[in-house]
Image: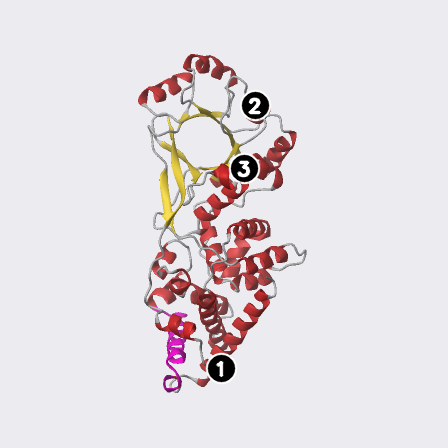
């Protein structure tokens, strides 16, 4: 079964991982209590081109922050147990039914709003019914957005260059039970102490903590399969099996989905054994919104041969597992193990680094890192098969005919996948 030079090169250079250059994905800044205990983090938009959120557009900036935070690979990743404030423009809230994250993890910080926008107020009610909390950014205490504050859990005031006596006089009238006031842009000790005396109970600014940049590698799948996924999710009788099959056709998209459900903005209830279980946890509504955000941000720079290579490995593992396994659930686990084992080729990162950031079952991790049963020997068989195919006829003579036939069947499946994707572009 001949391979193209690029495929052979991929196979022969499998163990030579060259890390991708890291980029600034976003920043996060701490919010503190009066005793300076950590209360929450705010996620901040950052661009390697030094564009601001306004330059990019508020909706796109929100999408980029979420995708970069939840679906990228960063050595700076860490578990966050505190609430996370996410800036969301009024237009996003009005045109979407939710933010695709766990409601108990986030606070929606509303910016770029009109105080008496009836559509925005109705939309906030709809979001609150789902359990979301809200913070109103940049409140003018002398002309407060009273209708918005009535629906808010937090309110932020920029205290840099503020008239402190006027603030101290105005804020008490706006205090109500359940509304927490946050002083932001606190630059020095004096501003912090004045904010405390005025009645603020949460604090944010350079005096307390500067924004911390988070760098890493952004996983960007191609747009074709993402668009197909969006279309499929709009079909009334779509099944999760069909969705899992579709996502499996784009390995980068599959890696993104695994990263998303393992991000700190979700409370993953158990380890993931296969791609379908991950997608079931997200659900159709969240999947649709993530797919739309990913499609908006995808640059399409996918190495086609790398995707072919990894998909053929994963499919071959699935076919061997179906032939040999007594456990009917082992085949989808085999496919996922094959995908994860190829992240060095696919994303130029080590499998160990990827596995540190996703909560996969020990069956997957043991197979990829230690070649342990039940799937490790199958993975090793397929890796040796790849090497034999790359090296030509002499090495192929030592491979089992059945395995070669399944490898050829996987190759046909991959060709069908890419033919289908070409038809959607």
Q: Position of residue 328 (x, y in %)?
A: 51, 70
| Magenta stretch prevailing secondary structure | helix
Q: Badge 2: how crowded within 10 Å, few (<14), some, or many (20+)?
A: some
Q: Nearer the viewer, residue 116 or 336?
A: 116
Q: Position of residue 239 (x, y in %)?
A: 62, 60
In the displayed structure, 225 sits above or below 101; it is below
Mark 2 or 1: the one toward you: 2
**Residue picked out by circle 3:** 132
Q: Position of residue 132 (x, y in %)?
A: 54, 37
Q: Position of residue 109 (x, y in %)?
A: 50, 34
**Residue picked out by circle 1:** 405
Q: Classify mark 1: helix, strand or loop.
A: helix
State the CA–CA distance, disc 1 to disc 3: 52 Å
Mark 3 or 2: the one toward you: 2
Image: magenta residue range: 371-395
Q: Which numbered tag is attached to residue 128?
A: none
Mark 1 or 3: the one toward you: 1
Residue 183 position by quadrant = top left
Please report the residue visible at 40 percent of the width from the left and 75 percent of the height from the top. 8
In the displayed structure, 413 sits above or below 291; it is below
């Amino acid at each position: 079964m001949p391979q193209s030079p690029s495929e052979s090169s991929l196979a022969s250079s499998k163990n030579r991982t060259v890390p991708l250059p890291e980029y600034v994905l976003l920043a996060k800044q701490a919010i503190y209590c009066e005793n300076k205990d950590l209360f929450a983090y705010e996620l901040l938009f950052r661009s390697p081109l030094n564009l601001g959120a306004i330059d990019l557009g508020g909706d796109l900036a929100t999408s980029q922050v979420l995708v970069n935070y939840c679906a990228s690979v960063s050595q700076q990743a860490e578990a966050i147990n505190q609430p996370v404030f996410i800036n969301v423009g009024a237009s996003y809230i009005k045109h979407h039914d939710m933010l695709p994250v766990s409601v108990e993890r986030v606070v929606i910080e509303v910016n770029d709003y009109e105080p008496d926008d009836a559509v925005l107020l109705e939309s906030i009610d709809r979001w609150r019914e789902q359990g979301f909390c809200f913070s109103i950014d940049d409140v003018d205490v002398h002309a407060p957005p009273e209708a918005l504050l009535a629906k808010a859990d937090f309110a932020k005031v920029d205290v840099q260059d503020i008239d402190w006596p006027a603030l101290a006089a105005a804020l008490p009238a706006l205090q109500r039970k359940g509304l927490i006031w946050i002083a932001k842009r606190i630059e020095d000790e004096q501003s912090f102490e004045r904010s405390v005396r005025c009645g603020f109970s949460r604090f944010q600014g350079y005096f307390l903590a500067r924004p911390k940049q988070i760098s890493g590698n952004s996983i960007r799948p191609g747009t074709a399969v993402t668009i197909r996924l969006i279309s499929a999710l709009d079909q009334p009788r779509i099944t999760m099996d069909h969705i899992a099959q579709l996502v499996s056709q784009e390995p980068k998209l599959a890696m993104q989905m695994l990263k998303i459900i393992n991000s700190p903005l979700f409370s993953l209830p158990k380890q993931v054994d296969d791609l379908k279980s991950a997608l079931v946890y997200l659900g159709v509504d969240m999947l649709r919104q993530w797919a739309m955000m990913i499609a908006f941000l995808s640059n399409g720079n996918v190495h086609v041969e790398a995707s072919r290579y990894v998909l053929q490995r994963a499919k071959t593992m699935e076919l061997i597992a179906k032939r040999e396994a007594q456990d009917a659930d082992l085949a989808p686990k085999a496919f996922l193990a094959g995908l994860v084992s190829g992240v060095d080729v696919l994303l130029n990162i080590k499998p160990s680094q990827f596995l540190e950031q996703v909560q996969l079952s020990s069956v997957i991790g043991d197979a990829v890192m230690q070649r342990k049963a039940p799937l490790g020997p199958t993975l090793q068989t397929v890796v040796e098969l790849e090497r034999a195919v790359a090296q030509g006829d002499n090495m192929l003579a030592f491979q089992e005919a059945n395995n070669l036939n399944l490898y050829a069947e996987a190759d046909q499946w991959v060709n069908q996948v890419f033919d289908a994707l070409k038809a959607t572009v």
